[in-house]
Image (cartoon, rainbow, N blue to C red):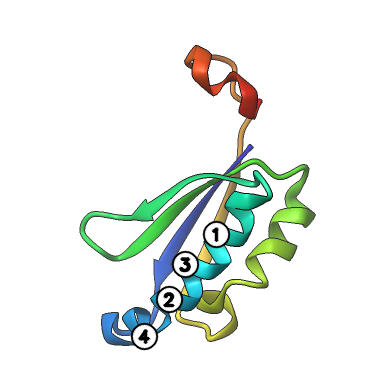
Amino acid sequence: MFVLILKYVASIEKIDELIPAHRQFLDKYYLRNKFICSGAQVPRTGGIILCNANDKEEVKQIIAEDPFYIFKVAKYDILEFIPSKYAPDFESFI
């Protein structure tokens, strides 16, 4: 399991221009059961994606398709972790 932390490195206006394309990217990986949840940070300096990829290489391949990455308006930190405790409804993601 991976936590993807996005940090915006461009103006919010540029981020907003890319939001529709970024949401299409998110939808693609929600349909493939790779993304579990996502959203903006508060304050709005970036975002968070909880990702259920097989390994870090797969995560990098996924990220490479994000318009935020392609147009260099956000940087990604990738944190890998192994869930050891979780709510029963979350078990299908493990």
Q: Position of residue 36 (x, y in %)?
A: 53, 41
Amino acid at pointer 4: Glu
Q: Residue at x 47, y 67 (%)?
A: 23
Question: Which residue, given by chain and number where applicable, does mark 2 sit on?
Answer: 20
Asked if the residue at tag 4 contacts the one at tag 1, i.e. Cβ–Cβ closer than 8 Å, the answer is: no
In this rendering, the label closer to the viewer, 4 or 2: 2
Using the image, determine if residue 64 lies above or below residue 17.
above
Q: CA distance from mark 1 to mark 4?
A: 17 Å
Question: Which residue, given by chain and number where applicable, does mark 3 sit on?
Answer: 23
How many residues crowd around disc 4 within 10 Å: few (fewer than 14), some, or many (20 or more)? few
Asked if the residue at tag 1 contacts the one at tag 2, i.e. Cβ–Cβ closer than 8 Å, the answer is: no
Instruction: Report if residue 86 is visible in the image.
Output: no
Q: What numbered label is drawn on residue 19?
A: none
Q: Position of residue 57 (x, y in %)?
A: 78, 56
Q: Residue furthest left?
A: 43
Instruction: Report if residue 8 is visible in the image.
Output: yes
Left or right of 74 in this view: 1? right
Callout 1: SS: helix
Asked if the residue at tag 2 contacts the one at tag 3, i.e. Cβ–Cβ closer than 8 Å, the answer is: yes
How many residues crowd around disc 1 within 10 Å: few (fewer than 14), some, or many (20 or more)? few
Question: Which residue, given by chain and number where applicable, does mark 1 sit on?
Answer: 27
Callout 4: SS: helix
Q: Position of residue 63 (x, y in %)?
A: 63, 65
Residue 20, quarter of the rendered image = bottom left
Asked if the residue at tag 3 contacts the one at tag 1, i.e. Cβ–Cβ closer than 8 Å, the answer is: yes
First in residue order: circle 3 vs circle 4: 4
Q: Residue at x 65, y 47 (%)?
A: 34
